[in-house]
Amino acid sequence: PAPSARHREMVTPVLAGVALAGLATAATIVSSSTLLAASSAAIGVLALALLVVVMRRSSDPTLDLRVFRRPGALLVFTAALVASMPNLFFYTNLLIQYRYALPLTSIALLLAVPQLAAVAGGLSSAPLVRRFGALRTSVGMLLFASAASLGALFVHADAPVWVPVAMLTVCAVPIAGAVGPLTKAIMDLAPVDGSAAASSWRNAVWSFGGTVGGVVVTGVAFAVFQSTLTDILDTTNLSTEQSGALAASVRGGAVVAELAQNPAVTDPAARELLTGPGLLSAQSQGFATAGVLASGLYLLAAGAMVLAVRRRER
């Protein structure tokens, strides 16, 4: 439709943006600064409360919620939110950089392979949507992504570099292939004059899910990494407190070679584990955890889309 020449209020979009930004910021810094996280969350909640008040009193707010009134809309948005939470590209990149002594150019060339697979996955979704519809195509892609993410369990401590690259290449096809169908499923919910609002909601939900998912998945995966490394170091002559402190330092980004030369690490076995098989095993456990969490999240998103299909059919 031709754009309207009438003035639109900007209070409701601004309040919605502040609410999302406050809550997302709180999620990302809660582990490093409780006070700042609480302040950000309070700002987000306050903005959300003001938004509700303003929208109830406004006869024609700019913030368009009509897309949520269609049958199954909340389920579709839930699926989009959950599907955006895993980021196996990030975790695989991190694993390759920390585990394999490769120059950055080689790592970039290796990761170009799953990127090309993602392009193929994105292109493949269009004919599937035309044949089966956006909702059913989304379910199929999300189920495929859930199964493929379990490939992280095959990245063992002694796995060569091609194993995580191959795993990510397979995962990239359905992960990217689900984006188009999910987007179309959301846009199909929009009224004739509400496509811009639906697109904005889709972008907001996708970004918010990625932020929260990064906090949740990263926190759990790195906690498993630290716990595993602590347990491995506990098998040496180090005390439990020393093992935990070393594992926490590695998790925090300390250089392992420098830690191993620490005068407090007097056990040669501990030094060997810290710079070799113990560290590799902990990395594998952390990466496997990220893959299992991704699999569960994609499965949950697929379940939401199945319910959306049934709701729309009814």
Image: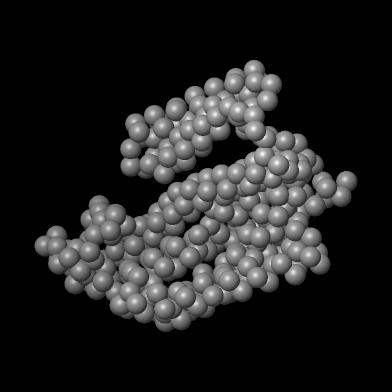
Q: Where in the figure is residue 220, as x and y percent of width and height? A: 45, 53
Would residue 237 be visible to someone looking at this image?
A: no
> Furthest-top residue in view?
57
Query: Which residue sits at x=59%, y=21%?
Result: 54
Q: Where in the figure is residue 136, as x and y percent of width and height? A: 77, 60
Q: In the image, is 138 to the left or to the right of 237?
A: right
Q: Nearer the viewer, residue 24 or 274?
A: 24
Would residue 68 be visible to someone looking at this image?
A: yes
> Furthest-right residue in view?
314
Query: Which residue sits at x=11%, y=62%?
Result: 263
Q: Nearer the viewer, residue 247 or 213?
A: 213
Query: Which residue sits at x=41%, y=44%?
Result: 28
Q: How many marks?
A: 0
Q: Where in the figure is residue 138, as x and y percent of width and height? A: 71, 60
What is the basis of the colouring in this image?
one colour
Judge whether 160 appears above or below 192 on screen. Answer: below
Judge whether 255 appears above or below 51 on screen. Answer: below
Which image quadrant for residue 227?
A: bottom left
Q: Nearer the viewer, residue 17 or 162?
A: 17
Q: In the image, is 198 to the left or to the right of 243?
A: right
Q: Where in the figure is residue 99, as x and y percent of width and height? A: 34, 72
Query: Which residue sits at x=65%, y=70%?
Result: 123
* Quadrant in which the N terminus is drawn: top right
Q: In the image, is 108 to the left or to the right of 309?
A: left
